[in-house]
Image (spheres, rainbow, N blue to C red):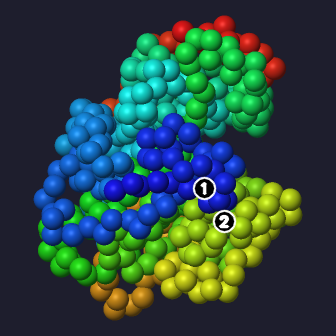
Amino acid sequence: MDNRFVSTRGHGGRPDLFEAILQGIGTDGGLLTPDFPLAVQSLESLQGLPYPRLAATLISTFAPAGSEAIIAEACTRAYASGAFPQEVVPVVPAGDVWVAELFHGPTAAFKDMALQLLPHLMTASLRQCGDARRALILAATSGDTGKAALAGFADVEGTMIKVFYPQDGVSPVQQRQMTTQTGHNVDVVAVHGNFDDAQRAVKEAFASPELAQACADKGIFLTSANSINIGRLLPQIVYYFHAYLTLAARGVLALGDAIDFVVPSGNFGNCLAGVMARRMGLPVRRFIVASNRNKVLTDFFQTGCYDIRRPFHKTNAPAMDILVSSNLERLLCMLGGDATQTSRLMQALATEGVYRISDAQFQSLRSLFAAGWQDEQEVLDTICRCYRATGYLADTHTAVALGVAEQYRIKGDTTPTVVLSTASPYKFPASVCQAILGKALPDAEAMEALHEATGVPVPACLADVMTRPILHTGIADPADIINYIKENLN
Ligand SMILES: *Cc1c(COP(=O)(O)O)cnc(C)c1O
């Protein structure tokens, strides 16, 4: 088998999986997607596999023949070496729906599912490509991704990571989570200014020929760990199968029965992995795409028109505060769009802030997706109502999905519904505390109050974050970041 990837815009090379992971993005600026039919799986043969084996089986189908053992080793390191509990993704009931908890990794958020595996896939890719260089990951973060990336790359051989966070743009808990990160290859730097300042500075670093040369002189290349890398998408296919097989094992459904997934969405990577799982034979009836007040996706799925000409809202589900969902570009291709059309739409988005898909694409969209949204007050109400009715304590992002699931459940419909839960309630304690106890408290006190009121255990990684030693105190001006990186290349 000669599995190759192509760019959504048609001119991005034809890398295999390992090359695609190192490349990150198509050379034409598009996203790399499989240029082969996805391998349809027999659900029977996947039954009973432990999570790391399930991951290895599914992800290997994207890799060149003969690399199964390499993928399996990466999956074992990610999911069976203590970073996750034995039950990697618990599937628990909450009233009429099931909740698949994607937040039991080392940073208590969904990003861990992919960012615990990506570094191992990256070192495997370096080895497979005979590339002796070291990978330097640069990331600007407004919060959660930075910490998950740090935790994933910490002490992974052949890699280094530098995370830049806005001095004025992260919560005290988020800042502590990052500045206490251990690992010989990690670096965390505060940047004067807000997230946009940090992001712009990192983009300039990626584009700097001078920095690229300084890195090359030391056998280093720059790369990113953001969710357009195909290596971040593939690990997310696994939990869709896992949730389905878990319900089958419990007798909630029989193999082959249909299922619905409700996905709290931002960049659309989570949901897109579900669409790929469906192409691999998972019997999904529909995906319900859940948004917060930044409801670009809701409008798109209801009208076929993607329109970012609107105000941006800071909400209580901040990881979904996104107007440009990059991974939608891959969906357009999967719905039969060709590279010429995709390039044209992306051009329209960049210049006019709006595009419309074809009628045929919109028809297939309507058959597979529903979409809805929740505002901030609805999120708080859902957290409170769900907790009172079922005892399930949801975070704000999960609550967006739970609220939308309620809107869309048809009376008498027996198709099982799985809500993907993307963060521990203790990751956003102030909002959850407001919802449950009706009072505003700072993060640390809110955590304690919530624990006392509900008895839900605080994840170990968050419990002691305010008392762990601070290891990173670096601070830089956005204009000095390139120099800072050059001077710290070891
Ligand atoms: C990243 C994130 C999301 C959104 O996932 P996408 O793949 O970007 O759609 C939702 N909730 C949380 C907590 C996240 O960290």
Q: CA distance from mark 2 to mark 1?
A: 8 Å
Q: Position of residue 269 (x, y in %)?
A: 52, 56
What amino acid is found at the position of numbered circle 2 in the picture? Ala
- Answer with mark 2 or mark 1, whichever residue precedes in sequence: 1
Residue located 63% across and 82% down the image? 362
- Residue topped by disc 1: 7
Secondary structure state at the residue bearing disc 2: helix
- Quadrant position of residue 336: bottom right
Query: Residue 455, can we see it?
Result: no
Left or right, 402 with reference to 391: right
The answer to whether residue 316 is left or right of residue 423 is right
Q: What's the amino acid at mark 1? A: Ser
Front residue of 367 and 468: 367
Q: Nearer the viewer, residue 82 or 465?
A: 82
Q: Is residue 137 above or below residue 27?
A: above
Give the SS element for disc 1.
Answer: strand
Place of residue 143 in the rendered image (x, y in percent of width and height, measured from the top left): 58, 37
- Residues at marks 2 and 1 touching, judged by CB atoms closer than 8 Å: yes
Please say if 195 is above or below 439.
Answer: above
Density class for disc 2 (Cα within 10 Å; few <14, some 14-19, many ≥20) is some
At x 65% / y 33%, what residue is drawn?
Answer: 140
**Residue 139: assigned label:** none
Q: Which quadrant: the N terminus?
A: bottom left
Left or right of 4 on screen, residue 31? right
Q: Residues within 10 Å of mark 1 (few under 14, many from 20)?
A: many
Residue 339 disc label? 2
